[in-house]
Image: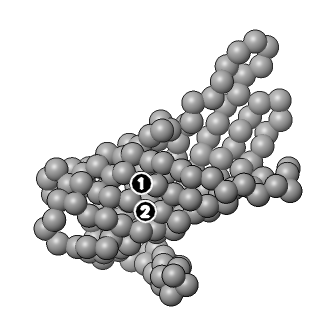
Amino acid sequence: MMNFLRNAALTALLAAGTSAGAASYIGLYSPLIGVQYQQDLDPQSALRFGAGLPLGSVGGESSSFLLSGDAAYLYRLTAGTSSYVPYLGAGLGLTAFTGTNTTLIFNAGVLLGLEYHFTDRLNTAYEFGFGPAWSPESPTVLFAPSFRVGLNYRL
């Protein structure tokens, strides 16, 4: 696992500026109202960036608003012509919550997902993640699951 994480970090740093011949995707995801951009680094690995608006609460004399962003490295376990493509990944995220005060929540996690390709241009992805989340305002570190369902279109 350490080898995978080391390779993920090195690949992300080295490939951030080189994407010649690689596929790019744009997409939507939930449970947030979100958009994402994914850049394939090679047939098995990709970098994904997302921004979302989790549904906040509005009520009484106060309202709240959430904005989140994340980045992830994805590694496909199979590559080729299969419609089903499982993948592993690692990601970092940040959520800003505005209510009475503004609170920042940082999170990191490992990801396990499955892409289903309807065509070579259109796919959907189902993802489960798990990892720590923490805030500068609190000494507590929580471990929590995350879920993501996305629809992607290849540019």
Which disc, if any, is residue 18? none
Amino acid carrying mark 1 in the image:
Glu
Determine the residue positioned at 74% across, 48% down.
104
Q: Nearer the viewer, residue 102 or 31?
A: 31
User: How would you rate the neighbour count of disc 2 (Cα within 10 Å): few for under 14, some for 14-19, many for 20 or more?
Assistant: some
Q: Left or right: where does residue 73 sit relative to residue 28?
A: right
Residue 137, x across and y down, in percent = 85, 50
Q: Left or right: where does residue 40 sit relative to residue 139?
A: left
Determine the residue positioned at 24% across, 54% down.
116
Circles 2 and 1, Cβ within 8 Å, touching? The answer is: yes
Residue 145, x across and y down, in percent = 57, 52
Q: Where is 105 relative to 109, above or below?
A: above
User: How would you rate the neighbour count of disc 1 (Cα within 10 Å): few for under 14, some for 14-19, many for 20 or more?
Assistant: some
Determine the residue positioned at 72% across, 54% down.
142
Q: Is there any visible trace of residue 27 in the rendered image? A: no
Amino acid carrying mark 2 in the image:
Leu
Q: What secondary structure is found at the residue carrying circle 2?
A: strand
Q: Where is 61 relative to 28, above or below?
A: above
Which disc, if any, is residue 112? 2
**Of callouts 2 and 1, the N-terminal one:** 2
Q: Is there any visible trace of residue 54 in the rendered image? A: yes
State the CA–CA distance, disc 2 to disc 1: 6 Å
Residue 78, x across and y down, in percent = 25, 73
Determine the residue positioned at 55% across, 37% down.
53
Q: What secondary structure is found at the residue carrying circle 1?
A: strand
Residue 64, x across and y down, in percent = 70, 28
Instruction: Please identify the quarter of the rendering in which residue 56 is found.
Output: top right
Which disc, if any, is residue 127? 1
